[in-house]
Image (cartoon, rainbow, N blue to C red):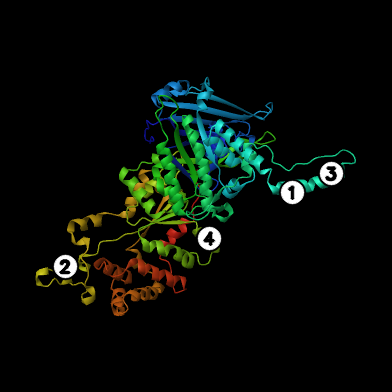
């Protein structure tokens, strides 16, 4: 799926990488405004950012990134790395300016950088750039240099950077914000002020004291004079003595060491964003941000992201008399809060696969090795309907769940399963295996709040460029079979008092009163008899070529009822039921004494009376009981699902 077309100036639409670190052969798609690159550790997020730095010019014109031999992919040391950039959304003026790089059919400007080791070169590497789809000689390199970047590094120490005696950050800010004449006037005023301080009595007393001793030491040979003064100031030297201070509004600013890391980091980011003031002098500036969430709590993360989006929206200008000045943000993140804030269209997920490959060894022979390679999935390219996409966005925005970062996922219908799965895994299924318990902590349990699993299956199992977000997905659902007619309660006529009875000779009594079910509609009943959710979900997965990667664990009836399957669970569940209905012990006994078994008996009551229990509270009480060591055995379908969730394998 193509990103939304933009008429507001060029943006980086596609980055194609070959033989660069873990990106052996991968294409990454970007959106015009902001793109978040998500993925687990070592998935290649930083490699993508570093590649962009290699092929675009720093906005400050001070290069800090060069290609090194170590940037070549493992096993490809004798080959060359290739970084191809494709820029879409060009204005009419930009098409004219970038005509030598223009792919007329695709309406994109294309530049390709190639890098390789070269023992004859002074820097041991050699680089060259080509322009256009035919990779012709780059006739106008100055045009490519109008595509710039500003880089915000990860693992930054904001307090050190801003409070450092080096003063380089403050000096750069001043240089960005002021003209040469303004800087010259500032230094002249500073030097005049220092000249006046020279006459202060403190310096005079100090000078006289030193001079008195110096005269006695030097008069016999060659008398010397001394002066305590200030060195003529230059901007870098002057800023070393400056300090940035900060405090909450209304409080006197203090040294940054007294501020929290989060606010110090925001202050540092603000100083980096100031560099974007110069973006108006470039056609496009890519703001490359690694881990913007560093030290920030979730609310500050959301504020920062919204602010960056505002900078993007405000950036393009009319380019009829100068550069377009567009800003595009590309950020890497581990934060579910950030990823859920932008919508899945603006997210690119990186995954790694392990592939076997034959390479040349140092002695010249061939050897087969396993290589970890980065793959890219642009979530905008997934075949989701607009409704499905909005549904997933709304869900992610509400839950901030780590769904996009997970490698092991269980989808469940509701809160009851979400509450019970972890405790059942730890205290029943894996109670004798510390290793398996630890492995299950890496499983993400996603409560979708309904039985509409299909959009999530599409999101997690669709294949893009030979890769999926997940290698395997587990869905836990209920069969919810239709009750036999004689077991269904229906509402009698309301004119004679509105009593509710069972059809025919079903069990009756005051405890049997409850709500009529949707199954009382004969048409809907027929639909339920024909419909099989498990088969439907597997067929949906098969439609996207992922049937073998989906495991559907289905309760014969429904979760709460199926927990009664193992006999040792029944006392534990009864105690949980009685916490909600302390005087209904006999009623519970009638449920479990049903002639078709306790599972069916409880299911029948749940179907006939929607208010029989609070399912969330019931699950919480059962979970506490299991954790406290009360007898409990996991039903087979849950055991199979839990074991399958930790048995994932990376597949190429």
Q: Residue at x 32, y 51 (%)?
A: 536
- Looking at the image, residue 540 sits to the left or right of residue 191; the answer is left
Instruction: Give the residue number, with chain letter if any, for mark 3.
Output: 215
**SS under mark 3:** helix
- In whole angstroms, how far apart are the C-alphas of marks 2 and 3? 115 Å
Residue depth check, mark 2 versus mark 3: number of the one nearer the observer: 3
Instruction: Give the residue number, with chain letter if any, for mark 1.
Output: 205
Residues tagged 1 and 2 counted as in contact (Cβ below 8 A) = no
Task: Decide which of 57, 244 is in the foreground and name it.
Answer: 244
- Looking at the image, residue 124 sits to the left or right of residue 440; the answer is right
**SS under mark 1:** helix
What x and y, as percent, mark residue 165? 64, 45
- In whole angstroms, how far apart are the C-alphas of marks 3 and 1? 15 Å
What x and y, as percent, mark residue 578? 34, 76
Q: Quick check: 444 above or below 22?
A: below
The mark that comes first in sequence, 4 or 3, is 3
Q: Residue at x 38, y 34 (%)?
A: 2
Q: Can I make out residue 420 in this image?
A: yes
The mark that comes first in sequence, 1 or 2, is 1
Residues tagged 4 and 1 counted as in contact (Cβ below 8 A) = no
The mark that comes first in sequence, 3 or 1, is 1
Q: Quick check: 2 above or below 610?
A: above
Q: Residues within 10 Å of mark 1 (few under 14, many from 20)?
A: few
Q: Any mark on residue 491, and which?
A: 2
The mark that comes first in sequence, 2 or 3, is 3
The mark that comes first in sequence, 4 or 2, is 4
């Amino acid at each position: 799926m193509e990103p939304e077309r933009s008429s507001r100036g060029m943006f980086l639409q596609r980055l194609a990488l070959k033989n660069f670190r873990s990106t052996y052969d991968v294409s990454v798609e970007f959106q015009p405004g902001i793109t978040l690159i998500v993925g687990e550790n070592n998935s290649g997020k930083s490699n993508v950012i570093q590649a962009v730095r290699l092929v675009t010019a720093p906005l400050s014109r001070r290069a800090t990134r060069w290609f090194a031999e170590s940037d070549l992919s493992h096993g490809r040391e004798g080959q060359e790395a290739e970084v191809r950039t494709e820029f879409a959304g060009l204005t009419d003026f930009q098409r004219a300016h970038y005509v030598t790089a223009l792919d007329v059919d695709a309406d994109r400007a294309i530049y390709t950088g190639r890098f390789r080791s070269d023992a004859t070169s002074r820097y041991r590497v050699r680089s060259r750039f080509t322009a256009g789809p035919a990779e012709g000689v780059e006739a106008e390199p100055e045009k490519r240099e109008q595509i710039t970047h500003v880089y915000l590094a990860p693992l930054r120490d904001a307090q050190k950077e801003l409070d450092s005696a080096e003063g380089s950050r403050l000096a750069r800010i001043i240089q960005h914000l002021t003209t040469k004449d303004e800087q010259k006037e500032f230094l002249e005023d500073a030097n005049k002020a220092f000249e006046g301080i020279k006459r202060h009595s403190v310096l005079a007393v100090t000078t006289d004291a030193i001079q008195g001793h110096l005269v006695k030491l030097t008069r016999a040979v060659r008398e010397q004079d001394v002066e305590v003064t200030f060195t003529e100031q230059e901007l870098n030297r002057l800023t070393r003595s400056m300090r940035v201070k900060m405090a909450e509004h209304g409080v006197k600013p203090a040294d940054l060491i007294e501020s929290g890391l989060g606010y110090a980091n925001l202050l540092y980011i603000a100083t980096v964003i100031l560099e974007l003031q110069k973006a108006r002098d470039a056609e496009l500036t890519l703001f490359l941000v690694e881990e913007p969430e560093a030290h920030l709590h979730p609310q500050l993360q959301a504020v920062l992201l919204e602010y960056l989006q505002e900078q993007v929206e405000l950036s393009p200008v009319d380019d009829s008399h100068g550069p377009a000045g567009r800003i595009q943000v590309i950020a890497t993140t581990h934060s579910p809060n950030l990823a859920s804030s932008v919508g899945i269209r603006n997210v690119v997920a990186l995954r790694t696969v392990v592939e076997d490959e034959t390479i040349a060894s140092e002695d010249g022979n061939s050897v087969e090795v396993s290589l970890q390679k980065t793959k890219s999935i642009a979530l905008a390219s997934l075949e989701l309907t607009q409704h499905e996409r909005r549904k997933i966005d709304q869900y992610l925005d509400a839950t901030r769940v780590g769904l996009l970062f997970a490698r092991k996922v269980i989808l469940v219908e509701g809160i009851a399963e979400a509450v019970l799965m972890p405790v059942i895994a730890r205290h029943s299924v894996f109670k004798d295996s510390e290793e398996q318990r630890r492995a299950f902590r890496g499983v993400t349990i996603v409560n979708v709040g309904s039985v509409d699993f299909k959009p999530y299956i599409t999101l997690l199992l669709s294949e893009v460029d030979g890769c999926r977000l997940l290698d395997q997905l587990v869905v836990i659902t209920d069969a919810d079979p239709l009750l036999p007619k004689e077991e269904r309660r229906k509402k009698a006529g309301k004119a004679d008092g509105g009593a509710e009875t069972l059809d025919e000779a079903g069990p009756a009594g005051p405890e049997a009163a409850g709500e009529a079910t949707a199954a009382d509609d004969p048409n809907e009943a027929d639909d339920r008899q024909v419909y099989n959710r498990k088969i439907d979900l597997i067929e949906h997965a098969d439609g996207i070529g992922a049937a073998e990667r989906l495991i559907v664990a289905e309760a014969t009836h429904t979760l709460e009822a199926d927990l009664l399957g193992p006999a040792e669970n029944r006392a534990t569940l009864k105690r949980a039921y009685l916490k909600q209905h302390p005087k209904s012990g006999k009623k519970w006994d009638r449920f479990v004494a049903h002639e078709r078994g306790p599972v069916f008996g409880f299911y029948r009551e749940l179907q006939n009376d929607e208010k029989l229990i609070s399912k969330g509270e019931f699950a919480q009480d059962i979970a506490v009981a299991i954790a406290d060591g009360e007898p409990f055995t996991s039903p087979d379908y849950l055991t199979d699902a839990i074991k399958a969730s930790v048995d994932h394998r990376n597949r190429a």
